[in-house]
Every structure is written in structure tokens, then in C-alpha cells.
Amino acid sequence: KQEVTQIPAALSVPEGENLVLNCSFTDSAIYNLQWFRQDPGKGLTSLLLIQSSQREQTSGRLNASLDKSSGRSTLYIAASQPGDSATYLCARGGSNYKLTFGKGTLLTVNP
Amino acid sequence: SAVISQKPSRDICQRGTSLTIQCQVDSQVTMMFWYRQQPGQSLTLIATANQGSEATYESGFVIDKFPISRPNLTFSTLTVSNMSPEDSSIYLCSVGGQGSYNYGYTFGSGTRLTVV
């Protein structure tokens, strides 16, 4: 069974800190990995997509890496802001076009 | 990437009734997906809907409970039938498929369902 695990489940940091969210997956036959943001009671906003042939992707203050051999991905957020407070989900894309999601990391950035 | 309009955004329903959720996409897409997110949990795939064929349901989900329509390449509906409080969740539609390997998946804004 394909599983995706996210650590930590929750994280609280002061504004301005750099932080790392972790995602691990059990099946290395991955096609892509996608990071999403979810605000309370809302849908998902795509942040970054990493193809299996790539090592990392960057968008603004966000950087996501992918290590297929170890089954890990990280999302790095630089200079965190209160507006970054949300739940961050990683999802593994497989050969059947389906996404397998982790349970998410609830991030709180305190002003 | 595609833009999805999902409605309703939220609803409070009586047990035993049914609710139909609609998703409209601004471009033609082959595959649409329906997910459920129970309180405090991550997303679970309910079914995959391709235009012109029956939806494919994941283990634990059945057509009688969650009938899906896919009349064309830009539209799909999910009905939650004979609702009980356990159906209270956020329901989301998503588009992706072959292009997703390059462009990823896009999600609707979600329908927050409360069954009382």
C-alpha cells in the first residue's frame, strides 16, 4: 500500500523564521510530487510540482526538494510570514494518475 | 492550469436527504477526480470520472451512495445520497491526468457539508 507521511503534524514559529516541512513516501516508483496549501475549510492551492526526474523546484520564498532514493521530499519556507499560516499537504503522483496525500502539517506563524 | 468552479461552497443538510455538488472546468479535461476530506483527516479519493464512461470507485465507496455524472469534458457532479452525520466532510473535485505529469493537479474550492 502506498503511504505518505508528513512530519511534524503541527509547527508553530515566530515570524521571520526559516522552516522545513517533511514528507516521506513508501513507493519509489513516483511520477511526481506536489505540495499544496489548504486554508481552514477551503480547497487546495498548488504550491510546487516536482517531476520524478527533478531534484527541486523553487517559487518565491518556497523551495521543494525530492529524493526518490530515500523516499523523501522537503518544503522549505524562507522568512515566514503570518500569511503563511495554513495546512501544508504533500501528495505523491503515481502511474495511475491518482494522488496519495499525507495528513498534512498545520503551520502557525506568530507575528 | 485549469480553473475549477465548484458549488455549493457549503451546505447544511438533514439526514436522509441528498446533495449534488457541481464542478465546472474552464477547459476540456479527460479525467476528473472526486475527493473527501473528513474532519481532521487528509484527502481520500472517492472516484475517477472520465467522460463517456462509468466512474471508477475506490475501495470503500459505492455508486449507490456517491453517484457521479460526467456529461461532457468540462463538467461533473457528485451526489451524496441518503446522508448521515458521518458524511459531514469537505468534498473536492480535481482535474489532472496525462497533463498532470507536467502541470500537476488543480482542485476546486471545496464543498463543506454538514449533516444534522
Image (tube, rainbow, N blue to C red):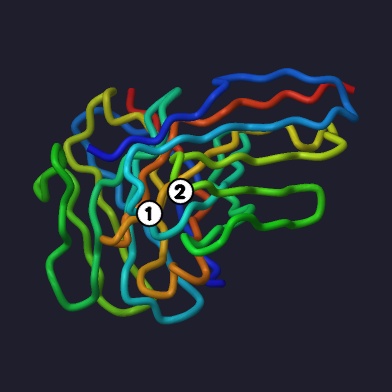
The residue singled out by tag 1 in the image is: A30
Q: Residues within 10 Å of mark 1 (few under 14, many from 20)?
A: some
Mark 1 falls within which chain? A
Q: Quadrant of the C terminus of chain A?
A: top right
Q: Where's residue B11, x and y in %?
A: 43, 39
What residue is drawn where x is 49% and y is 56%? Answer: B107
Which amino acid type is shown beneath numbered disc 1?
Ile
Q: Answer above or below: position of B66 versus B85.
A: below
Q: Position of A100 compared to B110: left or right?
A: left
Residue at image point 45% right, 58% down: A32
The residue identified by callout 2 is A68
User: Residue B25: where, in percent of width, then height?
Assistant: 46, 71
User: Quadrant of residue B85 in the image?
Assistant: top left
Pick the front one: B110 or A74: A74
Note whether B13 is above or below B74 in the view shown: above
Tell whether label 2 touches label 1 (CB within 8 Å). yes
Q: Chain of mark 2?
A: A
Q: Earlier in the sequence, mark 1 or mark 2?
A: 1
Quadrant location of the N terminus of chain A?
top left
Q: Is residue A57 above or below residue A36?
A: below
